[in-house]
Image (spheres, rainbow, N blue to C red):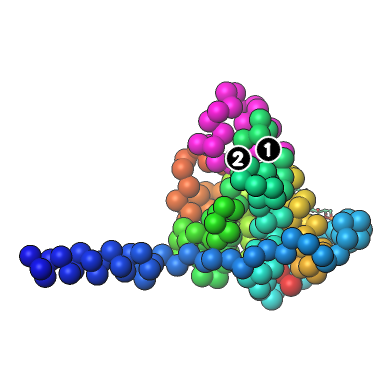
Amino acid sequence: MKKILSILILMSVLTLHGTSATADIKLPAPQTEGGMGLFEALKKRASAPGGDFPTSPLSLEELSSILWAATGLNRGETGWTVPMALGLPPYVDVYAALENGIFLYDYRANSLVEISKTDIRGKIGMQRFVASAPCSLIFVANAKSLSEINDEPHKREFSDAAAGAMTQDVYLASAALGIGARYIDSIKEDEIKSAASLPEDDRVICLMMLGK
Ligand SMILES: Cc1cc2nc3c(=O)[nH]c(=O)nc-3n(C[C@H](O)[C@H](O)[C@H](O)COP(=O)(O)O)c2cc1C
C-alpha cells in the first residue's frame, strides 16, 4: 500500500512539473511601452519579400511582444489590443509554429501552450518560401468561442475582421521591432488542422511569417 502511494505521489509530481509530457513556454513580459512611435511604424509597415525572407529566429521577448500586440490583454481582465464583436473574449486563436512544435498563445498566462511537438513549418504554406520562416503565427477562428453568434455569415465576418486587426497589429509591432513579417492566405488548412488536432469546425484563416 505504501509503495503504491509513493508511486502515485511521484506520478503527480512529475505531471505538475511538466516533465512527463508537455513543454509549455512561459513567455517573458512583452514590451508595452517605449520603442518606435506609432506613426513611424505605420510608415515602415510592409511585407518582407517571400523569396528572400529573413531566417533568424525571434527572441522569446520579441515573440511575446508580437503576440501581445496580436491579442494581448491591455486593460484589466477583459480588454484586448484588438476589438471583438459584442465585447466577447477573442474568438480567433493564435498558434505559433516553431522548430520545437506547435503552441497556442494563452494571453492570460502570457505563455505558449504546447499542442504538438511536430515541426510543421515546412508543410503549412502553398508557396515554398513559407517553409523558410523561423516562426509562423496561425490565426484560427474558434468555433466554440463563436457559438454565441447565431448565423454563419456573422461568424465569418467577425472572425475575418478580428484576424485583420490582429495581423495589422503584428505588422506594426514587427515594423517597430525590426522584424520581417508577411501575411499568407495560401495555406494548407488540412495539414494545419490535423497537425494541431483542431476541431473539425474551427477554421484556419491565415498565417503570418515572422523572421529577422
Ligand atoms: C488578405 C491577404 C492575403 C495575402 N496572401 C498572400 C499569400 O498567400 N502569399 C503571399 O506571398 N503574400 C500574401 N499576402 C501579402 C500581399 O501580397 C502583400 O501584402 C502585398 O503584396 C502588398 O505588400 P505590402 O504588404 O508590403 O504593402 C496577402 C496579403 C493580404 C492582405
Q: Secondary structure at mark 1?
A: loop
The reply to whether residue 186 is in sight is: no
Q: Are marks 1 and 2 in contact (CB under 8 Å)?
A: yes
Residue at the image point whose x is 69% and y is 47% from the top: 75
Q: Secondary structure at mark 2?
A: loop
Q: Position of residue 203 (x, y in %)?
A: 57, 41
The reply to whether residue 4 is in sight is: yes
Please tell me whether residue 24 is drawn above or below residue 94 in the rendered image. Answer: below
Q: Position of residue 124 (x, y in %)?
A: 59, 57
Judged from this view, the residue extending furthest toward the left is 1
On residue 139, the disc is: none
Q: Tell me which label, 1 or 2, sits earlier in the chain.
A: 1
Count residues near mark 1 (Cα–Cα under 10 Å), then give few for <14, some for 14-19, many for 20+: some
Q: Is mark 1 within 8 Å of ligand 1?
A: no
Residue at the image point whose x is 77% and y is 51% from the top: 168
Residue 114 belongs to magenta span: no
Query: 93 or 99, which lies in front?
Result: 93
The amino acid sitting under disc 1 is Met
Q: Which residue is mark 2?
A: 89
Query: 116 or 172, which lies in front?
Result: 172
The amino acid sitting under disc 2 is Pro
Query: Magenta segment, which residues?
Result: 141-162
Residue 150 belongs to magenta span: yes
Residue at the image point whose x is 36% and y is 64% from the top: 16
Q: Position of residue 40 (x, y in %)?
A: 91, 60
Count residues near mark 2 (Cα–Cα under 10 Å), then give few for <14, some for 14-19, many for 20+: some
Q: Which residue is mark 1?
A: 84
Quarter holding the C terminus? Answer: bottom right
Residue at the image point whose x is 63% and y is 42% from the top: 78
Q: CA distance from mark 1 to mark 2?
A: 7 Å
Quadrant for residue 138, please give it.
bottom right
Q: Position of residue 154 (x, y in %)?
A: 65, 27
